[in-house]
Amino acid sequence: MAPNIQGAALEAHHTAHHPPHLKHHFTSSEQQFGAAKLGMWLFLVTEILLFSGMFVAYAVYRVWHPEVFAVASEVLDPVMGGINTIVLLASSLTVALSIYSAQTDDQKATVRYLVATVALAAVFLIVKYFEYTAKFEHGVFPGASFDPHGDYARYNIPYAAQFFSIYFVMTGIHGVHVVVGMVLISIMAFRAHRGHFSSAYYTPVEVTGLYWHLVDIIWIFLFPLLYLIH
Amino acid sequence: MAQTTKPQPVLQPAGAGVAGHATVNYLNQEKGIRSWLLTLDHKRIAILYAVTLATAFLIGGILALLVRTELLTPGATIMGPDAYNQVFTMHGILMVFAFLVPSAPAIFGNFVLPLHLGAKDVAFPRLNLASYYIYLVGAILIAIALVAGQVDTGWTFYTPYSSDPARGGSVFFLTMAVFISGFSSILTGINFIVTIHKMRAPGLTWNRLPLFVWGLYATSIVQILATPVIGITMVLLFLERAFRIGIFDPALGGDPILFQHFFWFYSHPAVYIMILPGFGIISELVATFSRQRIFGYRAIALSSVAIALLGFFVWGHHMFVSGQSAISSVLFSLISFLIGIPSGIKVFNWLATLYRGSIWFQTPMLYALSFLFLFTIGGLTGITVGVLALDVHLHDTYFVVAHFHYVMVGGMFVAILGGLHYWWPKITGRMYPETPGRIAAGLIFIGFNMTFFPQFVLGTQGMPRRYYDYLPQYQDLHVLSSIGSYVLAAGLFLILGYMLWSLFKGKPAPANPWGSATLEWTNATTPPDAHNFARTPIVTRGPYDFHLAEQVVGGDGARGDGATVSAHTPQSP
């Protein structure tokens, strides 16, 4: 029945019209690229909804205990947070430049900018590591182990634990997303190095870049709400 | 279809010789267990889902029968109170998360959507397969929790009962299960939205889409917006138990009502995830089996979107007695009234479609008619509990239990059964036996009403829900309800039996046994080829244009290309 004829027709069609990156259920590269981008945008919407649950928790507890939040926020170092903000903004720039490089067939620049993005993300995580350990040393843990002592003893007030739980959960889940992004961008860098991308096909780089921009923009909201409220 | 073709060498459907029946099709074009477990074909993925979901439904259904049997007498009948709490909890979790939320999109959406659009597959076939396996992991975790026991929180997991790490060890498995299966729902929603936007056949404008597609579109919007919220809620509940972060537990400074807000912010839109595809199925059934265009196509299409969006603003109607402010209760009540309007529009439009139609009382139509009756009762009683003064008395009684079973079972599950019988020939290539089909439909209608109508009365008389023991005055209605559940179960097992029988002994089905006008019937063989269509359809008419009869009926799918067959065209018998 149909399969044989389809098979022969498909073969001829293949060599004539199908670039290697085009999946068979799509009729054109434009359709495939448009579908990939729409899919990633929809996924980013779900990520925003995921974080919005935590932002609502933040808003609720801050409205109920504004003075506690203001005091507890002093523990967070706005300089380190500010550095991280600039680092992430720079990484969004480098990932955007990597896409531009792919669009203009500059393979080496594509790889370089992707690697730079991963490096900046690593800097972000290193700064976060220092922030977290500084808190742990003084007994500021999320949840039941919350026991600020030493220099931080004055933060041992009711509902400060809620502030720090929300801080750790929000930055922690954000950090998980940074790690995931680093893995994805590393894979893109490797594939770019292997020559998988060109001006005809750079879809994975573009959608990975979109994801990375979301990770950046979540931080842009986290930083002032957590660090700058006193 | 306006596209007519010159006589071509006719492809002989070997074997059955039934018009449009393809003996070589997606079911057998590739063989072996790997070709099924690693398939990228949306039709095979739909079948993987169907088998797993049917298993989840069977387990959830047996748990329901255990609940009803326990309630035959006050006090212990067949189990103790702790076991009873676990049984109804797991019944709810399985039925909501493991069955009803995925059901119609995963089975019928996966199978039918690309066919309705004239596409070869969904936009992201690998993501589609991943969705299935993610769902499977979630379902297995739920099964582990069922066996490991100790989950007695009710499917709603209210804190602080559920956030206490000293008890309910399996709550851990369930928070993970719900979180993971949420991803399946999200990825399916993304896949469907992109498919509908990007992969429609030439000429298939939004206003020519089958209403099942509109239903899936609205469902997918809710899936992607709502599901992440239950995801983060489960993460926070897990962290509360594991690290005592103090967000929900009042002993730690947290707020238990915050959990309820988070939980219902997803779980109310979730009920619309559960019903919107059903509305789409009913549109298909009512149009086909009254052989008329749907009355008010645009109203039905847009009312689905309206329900999807309005559904995000009513979650507080689950919390009228939780201590939330009066003003928010008033607002939630008002918007809950408003959301009844689009549903009402649909019911009226379906009735108007029936009017002066050529009604064909096949089994799918019997389910569609059951739906109209049962869903109307369910929907109206939802408005009833949306009235603040009434809900104060009816909250947490059997009235609420009856209401949601009328909409979820009498509504959505009946629509699933209708869709199952309607698309069975297309999916399996076999006709189910019609007489047992009608008998089962009757048993289900009678059994369902016998089970749940008495529960409205029980609720107004004050019988609380989730209670294992009760005052003797309630016993008669409980016994009636339990007998009804056995009748309902009989109908369901009858369906299981004859459907399995039909796989081996059923009549081979023609391409378009119902004379329907949508692309899966007119342009694809039965069962479809792995690639769906011999050539991409070019659509020049609406999905219910029965008045273009010769083009519709003539497009019998025999050649899988929508060609009109006339007396002068040589064709195989």
Image (spheres, coloured by chain):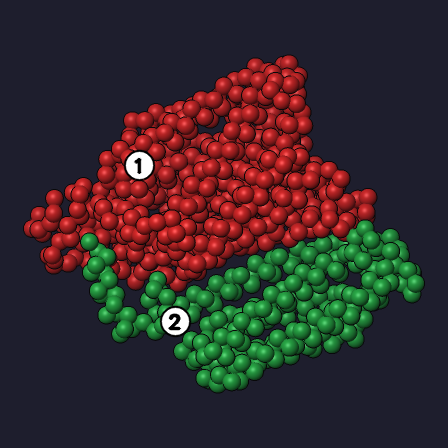
Check if mark 1 and mark 2 are on a common chain: no
Q: Is residue A175 visible?
A: yes
B113 relative position to B546: left or right: right
Residue B425 image point, x, y percent: 29, 40
B262 relative position to B486: left or right: right
Toward the viewer: B24 or B399? B24
- The chain that appears red in the image is B
Residue A155 image point, x, y percent: 88, 60
Toward the viewer: A8 or B498? A8
| Mark 1 residue crowding within 10 angstroms, few (<14) / some (14–19) / many (20+) | some
Residue drawn at x 34%, y 25% as measured from the top left: B439
Disc on res. A21: 2
Mark 1 vs mark 2, CA separation in Å: 39 Å
Q: In the image, what residue type sits under mark 1?
A: Leu
| Quadrant for the N terminus of chain B in the image | bottom left
Q: Colour of chain A?
A: green
Residue drawn at x 75%, y 61% as measured from the top left: A167
The residue that mark 1 highlights is B503
Residue drawn at x 57%, y 30% as measured from the top left: B401
Q: Chain of mark 1?
A: B
B307 relative position to B107: left or right: right
Q: Of helix, strand and loop, which one carries label 2?
A: loop
Q: Which image quadrant is residue B477 in?
A: top right
Q: Is residue B389 visible?
A: no
Residue B301 image point, x, y percent: 41, 50
| Mark 2 residue crowding within 10 angstroms, few (<14) / some (14–19) / many (20+) | some
Position of B222 relative to B194 (above/below): above
Q: In the image, what residue type sits under mark 2?
A: His
- Whether tag 1 and tag 2 are in contact, CB under 8 A, the answer is no
Position of B420 relative to A98 (above/below): above
| Quadrant for the C terminus of chain B in the image | top left
